[in-house]
Amino acid sequence: MSAAGSIALLSLNPKYEPMVYTEKEIEEMPVRIIGKVVEIRGKL
């Protein structure tokens, strides 16, 4: 979904659309991700 150098935020909640930030947007805004992991599912 995202190109090299970009960040895509995907919500499991269908109420929220995916948010994709390009490398340029990350540098100019800046984009910061603040939050915490509350659950991890899957095999490692």
Image (cartoon, rainbow, N blue to C red):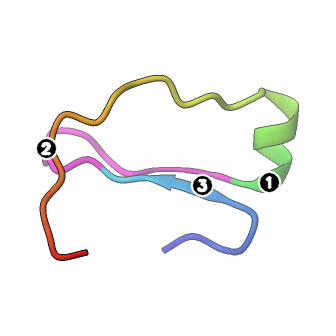
The verdict on residue 42 being magenta is no
The verdict on residue 17 being magenta is yes
Residue shown at 78% from the left, 42% from the top: 25
Whole-percent x, y for residue 41 in the image:
12, 60
Which residue is label 3 attached to? 7
The C terminus lies in quadrant: bottom left
- For marks 1 and 3 on the same chain, the one whose residue lies earlier in the sequence: 3
Residue shown at 13% from the left, 44% from the top: 13
Q: How many marks?
A: 3
The Cα–Cα distance between marks 1 and 3, rounded to whole angstroms, is 8 Å
Give the amino acid at mark 1: Glu
- For marks 2 and 3 on the same chain, the one whose residue lies earlier in the sequence: 3
- State the residue lying farthest toward the front: 44
Q: Which numbered circle lies on residue 23?
A: 1
Choose between 38 and 44: the one closer to the eye.
Answer: 44
Give the amino acid at mark 3: Ile
- Residue 13 sits above or below residue 44 on the image: above
Q: Which residues are magenta?
A: 11-21
Whole-percent x, y for residue 33 in the image:
54, 31
- Residue 27 sits above or below residue 19 on the image: above
Instruction: Classify mark 1: helix, strand or loop.
Output: helix
Whole-percent x, y for residue 26 in the image:
76, 41
Give the amino acid at mark 2: Asn
Residue shown at 25% from the left, 40% from the top: 16
Which residue is label 2 attached to? 13
